Image: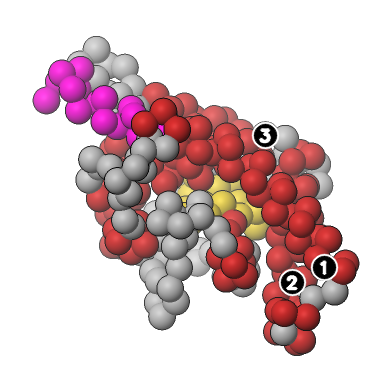
């Protein structure tokens, strides 16, 4: 999810979207046991500090009102759909390092199951980027102002909602998952490889065509995720009312 400071623009931002500018994630360390038994949402790749962040996010996802109902039903519903999906979702958190990026989170398919039964994917959050994100003065659709009025942990939860919406939408449709892998991820890998060799300003017509198809698909995919994010933002704010029992 490109952070709302500015929408995706330029080569660098496009390479980051969906985590495509980064190399393959290393093999899982078998000695780490951070994931809960029986869950499809795996936290083995989180450090101790990031696990503490994750537990704060998880408390928001599973918060209940005074009647025992989910306080944030959109977040909870997206989580449960992923849990029931049969697909594996690794949670990662990354620092900015020396890079400057406006990317708050990404969804990335790590391994595509040809049968569409058990894909392996990543939801990656960038806490430092989220922490420094500017909250704009003007409202978007339905009065939506991303991050406005939210605590640090609630911001993380909002971004998680956006990326879980991507995961649910894409992984639930085998054709869509293949398109994301082939049209988006493979195109970016080709673009990056070509750019390193010949320069990004010298792409040929075939790559230009593929980039146009990629951009159109990315724009289409953002709609459902942004709609889910608006609901998550509203529900977090509403949840601070008398229904939360605090």
Question: Which circle's residue, 2 or 1, is located before the other in the chain?
Answer: 2
Query: Which disc, if any, is residue 43?
Result: none
Spatial separation of the CA atoms under disc 2 and disc 1: 7 Å
Image location of residue 57, percent across then percent down? 32, 44
Classed neighbour count for the residue bearing mark 3: other residues with Cα under 10 Å, few (<14), some (14–19), many (≥20): some
Query: What residue sits 54% from the left and 30% below the top?
Result: 81
Residue under label 3, please give it: 172
Q: Quadrant of residue 11?
A: bottom right
Residue in front for this viewpoint, 88 or 232 = 232
Magenta stretch: dominant secondary structure: helix
Question: Which circle's residue, 2 or 3, is located before the other in the chain?
Answer: 3
Residue under label 2, please give it: 191
Residue farthest top in this picture: 67
Left or right: 86 as drawn, with respect to 154: right
Asked if one can make out residue 113 in the rendered structure from this viewpoint, the answer is: no
- Whether tag 3 and tag 1 are in contact, CB under 8 A, the answer is no
Image location of residue 93, percent across then percent down? 42, 60
Residue under label 1, please give it: 207
Query: What residue sits 11% from the left and 25% below the top?
Result: 246
- Whether tag 2 and tag 1 are in contact, CB under 8 A, the answer is yes
Query: What residue sits 26% from the left and 25% below the top?
Result: 238
Classed neighbour count for the residue bearing mark 1: other residues with Cα under 10 Å, few (<14), some (14–19), many (≥20): some
Q: Which residues are magenta?
A: 230-246
């Amino acid at each position: 999810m490109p952070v709302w400071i500015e929408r995706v623009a330029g080569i660098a931002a496009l390479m980051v979207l969906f985590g495509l500018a980064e190399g393959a994630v290393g093999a899982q360390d078998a000695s780490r046991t951070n994931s809960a038994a029986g869950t499809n949402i795996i936290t083995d790749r989180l450090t101790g500090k990031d696990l503490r962040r994750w537990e704060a996010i998880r408390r928001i996802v599973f918060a209940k009102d005074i009647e025992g109902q989910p306080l944030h039903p959109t977040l909870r519903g997206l989580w449960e759909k992923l849990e029931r999906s049969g697909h594996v979702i690794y949670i990662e958190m990354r620092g900015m390092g020396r890079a400057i990026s406006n990317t708050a989170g990404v969804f990335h398919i790590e391994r595509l199951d040809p049968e569409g039964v058990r894909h392996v994917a990543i939801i990656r959050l960038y806490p430092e980027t989220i922490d420094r994100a500017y909250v704009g003065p003007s409202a978007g659709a339905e009065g939506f102002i991303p991050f406005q009025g939210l605590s640090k942990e609630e911001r993380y939860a909002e971004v998680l909602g956006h990326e879980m919406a991507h995961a649910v939408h894409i992984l639930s449709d085998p054709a869509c998952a293949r398109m994301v892998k082939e049209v988006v991820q493979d195109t970016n890998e080709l673009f990056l490889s070509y750019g390193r060799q010949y320069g990004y300003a010298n792409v040929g017509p075939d790559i230009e065509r593929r980039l146009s198809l990629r951009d159109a698909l990315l724009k289409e995919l953002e709609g459902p995720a942004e709609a889910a994010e608006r609901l998550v933002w509203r529900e977090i704010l509403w949840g601070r009312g008398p229904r939360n029992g605090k």
